[in-house]
Image: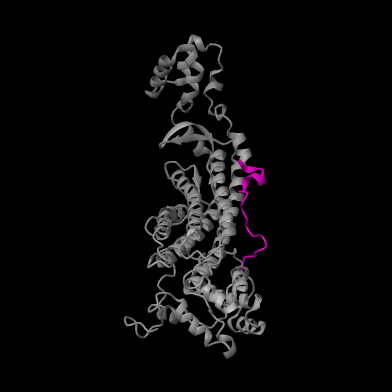
Amino acid sequence: MPSDAFPDESPRALDVGLLVPLAVGHDDAVTDAAVLEALVAAEVALVRAYAEVGAAPASVAGAVESALGWRGVGEPCRSHGVDVVALAAASVSGGNPVIPLVAMLKERLPADARAWVHRGATSQDILDSALMLTAFRAATRVVAALRATESALAAFAEEHRDTVAAARTLTQHAVPTTVGLRAANWLRGVRRAADRLEAALGQLPAQLGGAGGTLASFVEVAGPDAAARLPEHFAASLGLAAPQAPWHTTRWPVTELGDALTAAVDAVGVIAADVATLSRTEIGELAEGSGGGSSAMPQKQNPTGAVLIRSAALRAPQLAATLHLAAATAVDERPDGAWHAEWPALRELLRIALGATAHAARLVEGLTVDADAVARTLALTRGLVVAERLSLVLGPRIGRERVAALVASASAGADLGALVRALPEAADLDVDALLDPANYTGLAARLVDDAVRPPRAASRPADADPQPDRQEDPE
């Protein structure tokens, strides 16, 4: 397709990741080419389903599979011979790529097989099914990256189980915590997100309803009994769940998937936000294994991984909101624009989830702790990080007002230990132990242990079905 602006150049891809560095190297599963491969797979799966219910000759299904590069259940068709740029140009007049695709595929088939391609289907059947296949393959990678992050976080939390640090609430030092507990909290969020996404993947359905969602065309072609079995066989060839009914305007498969993807990005976004804060020069408690440089300042080691992940966390909720808006306006038996708005929003959400979770796994695997910086930060308030403990221990002895006055004096510069030792009511106390932040971390160590070694049966939702027999394509 020649360009008026660049008549002597080959077509330029609109987006190869120049402005989305987060996704570069991680988004091959959701490119236009990948979606096209899934579209072709959906068309082949329909012919296979017709053959399996006895409506089409098995030889026809075999011819279609061979001509269009069928690779097996749940796999895309890569040797289909359709030019994605030409297909995109041809899709404008009909508003979706399926209409011109059918004609292009039929040109590649023997004459006796052409009539069975797309027979009885509507464009939404093929496109929704292809997007679910694309989503399944992409989100399976997201789950794998989350599990890798989970594993790295467990090791990190265990290593720093007893590294005492200052907890912060509303940006200010609060009470002592541990680096390990902070990581354990990240771990719990990531694990839950992975479990939720696995459960969503197990429910992703194929779509097969015909023009108005009644399956009337399939009944006409194959009879009522075979037509009733057709969606299940169609879904099985795609490695997707069998639909309970056509869902042309019932968009929970898209919104629930979008919510699970957003939760995954949220979970790694929290890690990135904390790392970005704690790696600031003036704090320096954490550092990425390999930071990014600056074009102007050679001394800088920017927390690039955290920055890229945060860019995804800022975008994901709005993309999910678009999916919900489209679902809420999915009118009639096929929406007038709402359906179309889903496609790029879902694809972009998958894309940034792929990038964010891949970067999160690497970030956590390379994350380092500067123990000296952690200790230095913990000591900044000169013991006041245990003011809550002083209130609990000394309050019954001297009253809360006198404790408040003591803390105020320490905040103004007085030596907290000396103030406590000067109290007759504290004569029997081990003041050094009382003021030691390591002695006021509560159940932090136990909480870390519980997060690192949870009962696996309790860590996954009961309805989770990750379809373990599905093998992700190593390519």
Q: Residue 116: percent from the left, percent from the top? A: 57, 82
As drawn, 239 above or below 192 = below
- Magenta span: helix, strand or loop, mainly? loop
Left or right side of 470 for 14: left
| Residue occupying the far top of the picture | 424
- Please tell me whether residue 466 belongs to the stretch shown in magenta: yes
- Pick the front one: 441 or 213: 213
Query: Residue at (51%, 18%) from the top-left corner?
Result: 393
Quarter of the rendering occupied by the N terminus: bottom left
Residue 458 location, quadrant: top right
Q: Residue 467: percent from the left, percent from the top? A: 64, 60
- Pick the front one: 144 or 344: 344
Q: Is residue 230 visible?
A: yes
Residue 3 location, quadrant: bottom left
Q: How many marks?
A: 0
As drawn, 398 above or below 128 = above
Identify the magenta region: 451-475
Query: Residue at (58%, 61%) from the top-left corner?
Result: 140
- Please tell me whether residue 30 belongs to the stretch shown in magenta: no
Q: Residue 309: percent from the left, percent from the top? A: 46, 54
Quarter of the rendering occupied by the C terminus: bottom right
Query: Residue at (45%, 31%) from the top-left corner?
Result: 174
Q: Residue 364: percent from the left, percent from the top? A: 55, 50
Q: Is residue 28 visible?
A: no
Query: Residue at (45%, 36%) from the top-left corner?
Result: 168
| Residue occupying the far bottom of the picture | 111
- Pick the front one: 249 or 19: 249
